[in-house]
Image (tube, helix red, strand yellow):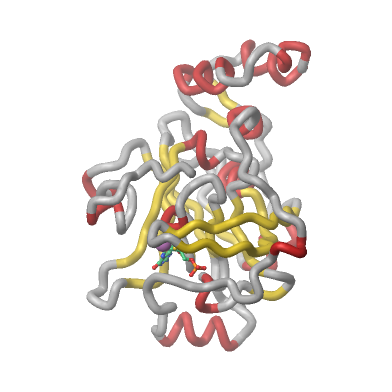
Amino acid sequence: MTLRRAHFLGLLAASSLTGCARIGTALTENETFHKVLDAPERLNLALLGAGQPLAYEYPDSAISPDFRHNGFDPPSDPQFTQWSRNGWHGYRLFVSGLVDNPTSFSVEDLRTKFTPLTQTTRHDCVEGWSVIGKWRGVRLRDVVAAAAPKSDAKFVVFRCLDDDGTGTKYYESLDMRQAAHPQALLAYDLNGELVPLKNGAPVRLRVPTQLGYKSAKHVGKIELVAALGGENGKGGYWEDQGYEWFAGI
Ligand SMILES: Nc1nc2c(c(=O)[nH]1)N[C@H]1C(S)=C(S)[C@@H](COP(=O)(O)O)O[C@H]1N2
Ligand SMILES: [Mo]
């Protein structure tokens, strides 16, 4: 399958201008900046991600010996169990919703079709503990761009494969700007090995600029939507229980 790395993505002019306004004047020298101005109805996710505050990246010496885990048990259904026993063969990460190019990726696709990124960042759980881990994966924005979001796509919803024991699945969401953050990662490795089951295998989101509950584990599907609310709830399992949707740290 050919990846559509559309240079520009169709998003509304309003969000495009917001994205540009935050970046300041340095980019006015940049050819891309002018292209965005020439086509204000379109938006470049890399540009939207630029200029946002970055989470601190630690040296390897700071990596926690064990990356503590939290949350629901990993999925235990036969299909997930089979994937996990077969090196994740059969698993696919779907990208759908308000996109021109609905698509899906195996873990191998993620490893080979995208530029890899490694980051050693801190994970802060709202319960008051932190761990530092070295994650490797692909930028969320590259995976989103491959699906070519439509102009009305405003939020990115992560549908997870695990549930709370009563059948209610974990889910989370980011807006397009947060999804474009250069450190928002879809991770497949932790500390040089496959992401362990307890930490969200085979693919988990890492958003080091926000509290741990935003970093959805066991992601099965990424959905581009116009709005939260309705079937998209308050934008996350814990948000539906009263947590803040924005969990910046
Ligand atoms: N799918 C899924 N994602 C999840 C959770 C969960 O229960 N299920 N728990 C969240 C919370 S509260 C935290 S602190 C982190 C824990 O990640 P870890 O188990 O790798 O430490 O995952 C977040 N993402
Ligand atoms: Mo958490």
Indicate the quadrant containing the N terminus: top left, top right, bottom left or bottom right.
bottom right
Q: Residue at x 44, y 38 (%)?
A: 175
- Tell me if 58 is positioned left or right of 131 in this view: right
Residue 190 in the image: state x and y as whole percent.
66, 69
Residue 84, position in %: x, y? 56, 83
Q: Locate residue 203: give its quadrant.
A: bottom right
Instruction: Report x, y in % for residue 22.
Output: 56, 20
Residue at (48% x, 47% y) in the render? 210
Depth order, front residue of 124/205: 124
Q: How many numbered dots are placed on residues in this image?
A: 0
Q: State the residue in front, 63 or 135.
A: 63
Q: Residue at x 58, y 88 (%)?
A: 85
In the displayed structure, would residue 21 be above or below residue 125?
above
Quarter-of-image position of residue 118: bottom right
Q: Is residue 170 above or below residue 141?
A: below
Residue 221 visible at all: no
Please indicate, yes or no, whether residue 24 appears anywhere in the rendered image: yes
Q: Quadrant of ligand 2?
A: bottom left
Q: Position of residue 165 (x, y in %)?
A: 27, 77
Viewer-proximal residue among 100 and 81: 81
